[in-house]
Image: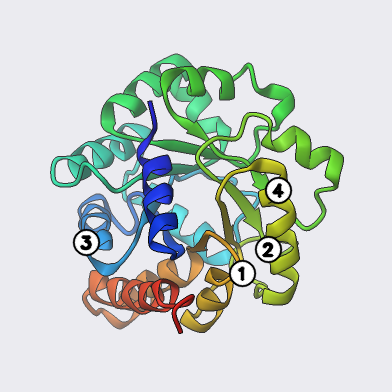
């Protein structure tokens, strides 16, 4: 059986356009606001939603997402509440794919078997676990695939051909290409460099390729959407939460306005 992720990318391919994948941290700045933002993102143009699983040591994340995770943890966000957020989201939306992204420790503490069962029941479609390499596939990847969840790997500019073959072997749904060396939200993606890398990864994986870690503006998102199957934006969105908190402004409005601008750029990128 196909997953929501696979069906969404297949539908977008037929339409001839790329996807906008949005990342927000579950529970940032609090559970209720985070849920409201998630519910509104599809109407703003998000094709796939990534939800961060808050963790105290997010090694691949830059300052913006680190701060988002700390805000969420301070507000009481835990794995049980992240899965509850997905369940609530699914009450009104049974089509938009949801990917949980983060680190292995919170899953391990929750219990792998329990986590996979609860995530599937809640309506999660895929997992990105940044610090769990293919050498540890028996730990979570293989059980996740057996449970019907897509397991999504990250490739980077430093991934050589041999390693790429290993990474894509059990990747399902799409492969996430990290367009810059370093952490999220610090450097900017270079569209020319991304183009060749995407072609290489797509050929190796025979899967859609989503590009992230260096996209902050609609212009950059459009450039990526012309060569990749999806543009992933996270830091630029969670920064809008930070700015709204500092300005004591309505939080959701800025995030959704930013998402709408990004979606318009991505969705029209190939049609001019």
**At 51% across and 77% down in the image, what residue appears?**
222
Residue 67 image position (x, y, % from top left) = 49, 61
**At 65% across and 38% down in the image, what residue appears?**
131
**At 31% across and 75% down in the image, what residue appears?**
260
Q: Label 2's element?
A: loop
4 and 3 marks in contact (CB < 8 Å): no
Quarter holding residue 132? top right
N-terminal of the pair, mark 1 or mark 3, is: 3
N-terminal of the pair, mark 4 or mark 2, is: 2
Q: Nearer the viewer, residue 179 or 59?
A: 179
Q: Label 4's element?
A: helix
Estimate how packed mark 4 is, as few (under 14), some (14 to 19) or many (20 or more) residues with alpha carbons within 10 Å. few
Q: Which residue is mark 4?
A: 203
In the image, which is nearer the foreground, mark 4 or mark 1?
A: 4
What is the spatial separation of the Cα atoms under label 2 and label 3, in whole angstroms? 27 Å
N-terminal of the pair, mark 4 or mark 3, is: 3
Residue 6 image position (x, y, % from top left) = 43, 41
Return the residue found at the far left.
Answer: 92
N-terminal of the pair, mark 2 or mark 3, is: 3
Visible in this render: residue 23?
no
Q: Which residue is mark 2?
A: 179
């Amino acid at each position: 059986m196909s997953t929501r992720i696979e069906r969404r990318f297949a539908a977008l391919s037929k339409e001839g356009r790329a996807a906008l994948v949005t990342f927000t941290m579950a529970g940032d700045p609090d559970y209720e606001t985070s849920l409201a933002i998630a519910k509104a993102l599809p109407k703003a143009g998000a094709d796939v939603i990534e939800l961060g699983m808050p963790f105290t040591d997010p090694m691949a994340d830059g300052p913006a997402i680190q701060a988002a995770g700390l805000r969420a943890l301070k507000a009481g966000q835990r794995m049980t509440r992240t899965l509850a957020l997905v369940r609530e989201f699914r009450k009104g939306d049974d089509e938009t794919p949801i990917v949980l992204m983060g680190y292995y420790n919170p899953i391990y503490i929750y219990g792998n078997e329990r986590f996979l069962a609860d995530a599937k029941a809640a309506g999660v479609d895929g997992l990105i676990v940044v610090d769990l390499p293919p050498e540890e596939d028996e730990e979570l990847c293989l059980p996740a695939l057996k449970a019907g969840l897509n397991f999504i790997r990250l490739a980077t500019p430093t991934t050589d051909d041999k390693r790429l073959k290993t990474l894509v072997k059990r990747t399902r749904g799409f492969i996430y290409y990290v367009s810059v060396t370093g952490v999220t939200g610090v450097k900017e993606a270079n569209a020319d460099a991304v183009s060749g890398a995407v072609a290489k990864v797509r050929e190796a994986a025979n899967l859609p390729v989503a590009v992230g870690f260096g996209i902050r503006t609609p212009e950059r998102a459009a450039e990526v959407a012309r060569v990749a199957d999806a543009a992933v934006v996270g830091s630029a969105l969670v920064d809008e939460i930070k700015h709204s908190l500092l300005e004591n402004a309505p939080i959701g409005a800025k995030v959704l306005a930013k998402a709408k601008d990004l979606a318009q750029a991505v969705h029209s990128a190939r049609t001019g």
